[in-house]
Amino acid sequence: MDYKAKIREYIEQNNLQAEHFEFATSCHTVEEAAKAVNASIDELVKNVCLISEDGHLIVAIVKGEDRVSTSRVGKILQIERPRLATADEILRYTGYPAGGVPSFGYPAVFLIDTKVTESAYVYTGGGTTNSLVKISTAELLRANQGQVVRVRK
């Protein structure tokens, strides 16, 4: 599967104002991604994939240096505390491998931390562990129809 082509196609078909970047080095961790794109960790977001008790995908989007509070996610959605998705579940639910998951482009409940919207733009997963997408936070909200709430610890 060409995951980079898949996300590029999604961006194009949905008329999103976003840029896709490919790198020779890994962007799997926030530190690696910041180094690859020559940006600060503050400009990156990570997409933490969670599974609800009834098997639905929840994606909590936080700034690169932040961690997700699963108890807070549970309270926001009025459900039992969700668990972290496995790598196999991430691929099955999102269509992208762990470490390359974008912040949009697949069915999920998207929760965007309030700190994310303080930035004009962010870098998010680009479909693979060596690619990123740069997107404005306003466009990100349009792309995933996410709910802006505090999900960080």
Image (cartoon, rainbow, N blue to C red):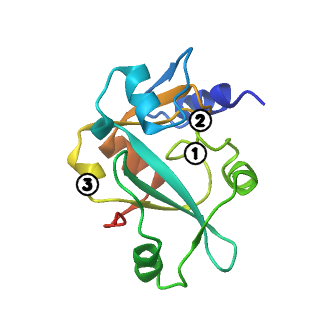
Query: Mark 3 highlights which residue?
Result: 115
From the image, tell me which residue sits under label 2: 10
Q: Quadrant of the C terminus?
A: bottom left
Element class at badge 2: helix
Residues tagged 1 and 3 counted as in contact (Cβ below 8 A): no
Q: Residue at x 65, y 80 (%)?
A: 53
Amino acid at circle 3: Lys
Q: Secondary structure at mark 3?
A: loop
Q: CA distance from mark 2 to mark 3?
A: 26 Å
61 w.r.t. 133: above or below = below
Q: Is residue 69 above or below residue 14?
A: below
Q: Which residue is mark 1?
A: 105
Amino acid type, residue under disc 2 in the picture: Tyr
Estimate the x, y position of residue 103 in percent, counting from the top left: 49, 46
- Mark 1 vs 3, N-terminal side: 1
Q: In the rendered image, which quarter is residue 31 located in?
A: top left
Residue name at image x 54 percent, y 26 percent: 131
Give the mark nearer the N terminus: 2 vs 1.
2
Categorize mark 2 by other alpha carbons within 10 Å: few (<14), some (14-19), many (20+): some
Q: Residues within 10 Å of mark 3 (few under 14, many from 20)?
A: some
* 33 horizontally vs 82: left or right: left
Which of pointers 2 and 3 indicates the residue nearer the eye?
Answer: 3
**Amino acid type of the residue that numbered disc 1 sits on in the rendered structure:** Gly
> Within the image, what quadrant is residue 152 found in?
bottom left
Look at the numbered disc 1 and give the secondary structure of its residue: loop
| Left-right relation of 71 to 10 | left
Which x, y percent locates residue 49?
Answer: 57, 58
Q: Which mark is residue 15?
A: none
- Left or right relative to 102: residue 30: left
